[in-house]
Image: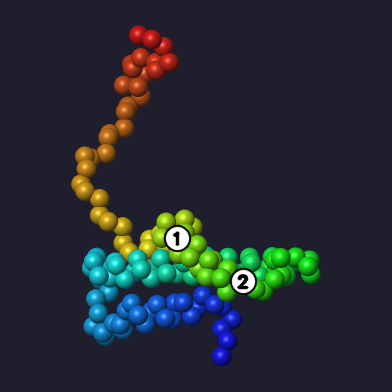
Amino acid sequence: MTTLNPNLNRFKEAGKAESAPLPADASSDPNDAAFRARATTAALKFESYFIGSLLHKMRSATAALADPGSPFKNPVNNDMLDMTDNLVADQLASQRSFGIANTILRQLLPAPSAPQSAPPARPVSATEQSSAPPLNKPT
C-alpha cells in the first residue's frame, strides 16, 4: 500500500519506537511535568509534520509547473529530497520557527502563575497632575 504523504511513515515509526500507549489512569493534569513533556513533544512533532508537508507540497507544485526538460521534473533524487525536506522540517520545528507548537501549547497548558507583585499604582488626580512640571521643558 502506498502512502500519499511520505511524512506519515516517519511519524508512525517514530511513535512505535519512542512511546508506549498511556495507561487509562495517566495523569492529564496540565501542571504535571510528565504531561507538559508529552504535550511539548506532540506539539513539536505536529509542527515538524506541518512544515514537512508544506515543503513537500511546494516541491510537488514546482515540479508540476516546471517545463518538461526542467531538472525540477527529474524524479531521480525525489527520495533524497523528501528526506532533506523532513530534516529541514525537524530543524525548523525544533527552533519553533513557525510558532505552531507555541500556539498549541498555549491552548493545552495553563500560563504559569505570576508571582505576587506590588499593588497597581493609584490614578493621579487632576490637581496633582496640573501642579507637576511639564515633561518637555527643563526645570
Q: Is residue 101 found left or right of 29 in the rendered image?
A: right
Q: Position of residue 36 (x, y in %)?
A: 29, 66
Seen at 30% across and 82% down, the residue is 20
Question: Which quadrant is the N terminus positioned in?
Answer: bottom right
Kind of residue sitting beneath label 1: Gln
Q: Which residue is drawn at 50% across and 62% down?
A: 88
**Residue 2 occupies which quadrant of the picture?**
bottom right
Q: Which mark is residue 91?
A: 1
What element does badge 1 sit on? helix
Residue 46 as seen in the image, left or right of residue 34: right
Q: Crowdedness of circle 2 by 10 Å Cα count: few (<14), some, many (20+)?
A: few
Q: Report which quarter residue 54 is drawn in.
A: bottom right
Per the image, the residue denoted by label 2 is: 77
Whether 14 is drawn above or below 108: the answer is below
**Earlier sequence position, callout 2 versus callout 1:** 2
Q: How is the image coloured?
A: rainbow
Amino acid tagged 2: Asn
Q: How crowded is mark 1: few (under 14 residues within 10 Å), some or many (20 or more)?
A: some
2 or 1: mark nearer the eye: 2
Q: Where is residue 50 in the image (x, y as percent from the top left)?
A: 51, 68
Q: Which of 101 and 57 is in front in this view?
A: 57
Q: Is residue 35 visible?
A: yes
* In the image, farthest residue toward the top: 139
Mark on residue 47? Answer: none
User: How far across and down, in percent of the image, does residue 126 sit?
Assistant: 35, 24
User: Distance from label 2 to label 1 (Cα)?
Assistant: 21 Å
